[in-house]
Image (cartoon, rainbow, N blue to C red):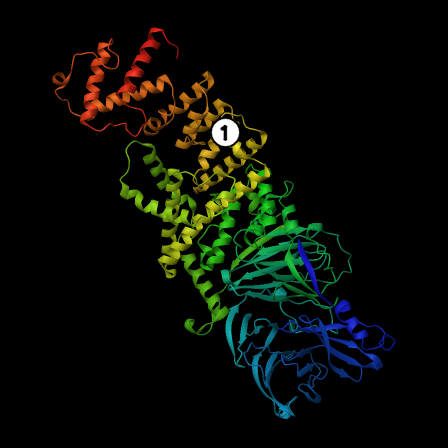
Amino acid sequence: MLRLNPTFDTQKDVVSSILAKEERANIGVLEPRILSVERDGGVVYSWRGATGTTRIGKYDPHSTENKLLYTFDKQVCVSSCSLNKEETLLVSKCLTLLIEIHPINNTKVLKAVDCKVKVQFLYPKTCRTTVLESHLLLAAEDGYVDLYHITLTRQEGYRVVMLNPERLSRERVAEEFSWVQWDSDTQRLFYLTAREKHTLKCVQFSPDRNFETMFELPLEIPKMSSVTSVRFVNFGHDHYQDLKDEGLRLEVFTSPSGTMCVCYSHPVRWHKDATYTIAFVHRGCSKTFTVSLEKGSAPANLPTVHPIFIHLDFYIVVYLADHFLHLINCRQQDLLCYSLFLSGADGHIEALGSGSEVVSMSGSRLLDARAGRMYTMELNPDFLLELLSSDRPEAQRLAALHCMLVYLQPNPVIELKIINWISENVMSFDAFDQIQEFILASLYRVSYQQCVSLDKLLPYSCVLEKKELPVALTAIPGVKCTPELLCQPIIKGKAKSLQGYWEELQHVLERMKYFEAVPSPRFRTNLIKEDWIRYQAAMNSEKKKSPHSYRQIEENTKKVLSMVDTWRLDRRVVPLFQEEDQQQRVLVGLMVDKLREHLNRHLSRLGKKKIDLLVVNYAAKLLELVWHVLELVWQKLKLGPWVLCIKQQGSSEEWAMFHVMFRILEATKGLCLPLPPGYSTLLSVLGVRCLPRHTFLQYVDHGLLQLTEPFVSRLITGLDNSDANEQLKFSILKRLPEHIEQKVSHRWDHPITSACISREYVKTLLEKYSESRDSELLDYGKSSFYPDFLPLNYLAKILSNREEQAQNPFEEQENVDVRFVEETALKQTLIKLGYEVK
């Protein structure tokens, strides 16, 4: 599930460097021990050198070089160590010594009492190249944190020494805490106090040496998990500490997008359940999970252990070796089906055994100090693809699909594999529709990258459209979930003065309160349905709506189609965007209208221009996405332009293409989403090639296939007039709206259609213009057309006279005039009399 990529190993990256400087025979067992990892990524480590010394060095990951920092002339136990940014001062906890190392000179005892002490230099981001002041945090087991300000001075051009080491100024940062965590990357200090009740606080350190308590959050921690001793998190690693741990394990994870998760767990004994809590501060709720462990799966003398918490982008990983791995979604935590729970071999991480002591670091890094290794972590897409197989629970399949589509970085290879999986498993699952999930999740990822504020407004999964959730998506076997509301956090300082992460968190919390107060903040695509049905009825009727009612819709559609990526149209193989397709144009414009209205209601601060751009881009990406899927499936099946030929019967590959396209039609129709112009025509062409004739007509009657004008025209002209084809053509013509039938029937050279056209022509010509004095205009001489047929000659004279007086009502139809009517009438007469066959 998790792929761990080694980035540092003391045996590979450090030992060779040490051996190059010292003889192995004088060292004995060479076991470098990681002491800390600084903000710049440098790894501070110690080892026992030759002649009984203890040495401290640093590994630079950028240059992959090792540097000796300091040597103690005897063996000492270094349990905490930190190096300042300029690499001029070193603090190690023996007697908590502050040591000058550039050059080696003074030492200063900061604390000489026999208690647990942790030290950490601040690493402020500054533009100054020369800094003559360092700031050191000292956290003591007594329950306080002090900040030491150490002034430096330069001597002889290169010597950097402490100025007045006996008079170091210090400030009290925190006190009376039972737990403390340092976040090196963001320069934040979290600590937990318990005067009246447990309160989580956060101190933010700024580059100008100032600090401020920015955050407070009351936590309801059960009595059974009370903190029995002070716990230090991310203050380096103490290889000499007692591993016995009966107290609370707690960690805080934040991300620049304004999320904060507080994770804590109770000790796990082998014969009892595992319980852990994730407090989603940015969502105002927490979830406590209780996992039933397999009884008898561990020996009775196994010590108590804690699940490991790992921060991985938008997920919190909870891992208990040999038992389970729980991938918890931090952004969409409303439903359990968007998180992934794995047990047994599926949940095993090879590099992390039951005895591993790991720390989650920023940048998706993991430190295993006891093993002397560091890793970068990532989700394994190959394993996620395996979870899509049919023998997996549907909740796992949904979580894996959602994870790959929304949270993994765009990867054409993975995308192609997902599309292939959809084409091979095209029928909808019982609990969710995989095509709908693919469309909505893909669009959500693109839109969220453009504007984070769309997080709570756009649909991200097809499950949200269901009135009732299937049981398969609401529970995990063996896992109990208890949700609770959190107390309102306090962010100190005025909203206008907040910067960076705290500004983003404040904005997220405000949006959360707003969206909880308003009904249905997330856009639901079925909001379009009612208007869409009304527009469909209008388009299929002879009574056209006024141009004004369509003007806005058409303008929306023009904007969308102008943004669709058609610049490589000559390299596209699926013939779309090559016709008007009025129905899809209306649906595109209607969706833009409704989505724009929704965003303007809930996100007006962005401004109308920004919202209009987001909405138009959303619709354009939808059309491009469907086109892209069809392109990949088309190429996979090795289809070509012959598919558009009506005369031939479809192959098995064309049937597979028809099935995929039909399922896409079903999925988008269920969500009332538009399709690219030309989609309906192509689907009907495939349908008439692949389906039996009576089945094809049933699809048409049930509204599953559309008789578009381009399709009917292609069918009318492409098929000959055999009895079976004649029957199909007549069956299709009688199913067309009258105004469309009149347009396409003239393209079929057939006596019956000719007769219909003639009758309509005569009717229109006679009704449209008032009667005139025809008798005065008639010449009873012989007709130039057919002199022996006087009734027809009389009618032809009247029609010719009307044509001269007024515009031909059928002039847009080629060859429809009086001569056409005469020829058709005579031919029909001969057929009736039996002198000519149809």
* Residue 407 location, quadrant: bottom right
Secondary structure under the numbered disc 1 in the rendered image: loop
Task: Please rate how many residues cluster around mark 1, counting C-alpha atoms within 10 Å: few if below 14, some from 14 to 19, many from 20.
Answer: some
Extreme residue toward the top, this view: 834
700 to 508, vertically: above or below: above
Q: In this view of the protein, which residue sits in the foreground, 501 or 289?
A: 501
Q: Amino acid at mark 1?
A: Cys
Residue hosting label 1: 645
Q: Quadrant of the C terminus?
A: top left
Question: Looking at the image, is 314 positioned above or below residue 751?
Answer: below
Across and down, in percent, residue 752 comes to 35, 17
Q: Quadrant of residue 111?
A: bottom right
Direction right: furthest residue = 25
Q: Residue at x 37, y 61 (%)?
A: 605
Task: Determine the residue located farthest toward the front in the rendered image.
Answer: 784
The answer to whether residue 767 is seen in the rendering is no
In the rendered image, residue 424, in percent from the top left (x then y), is placed at: 60, 38
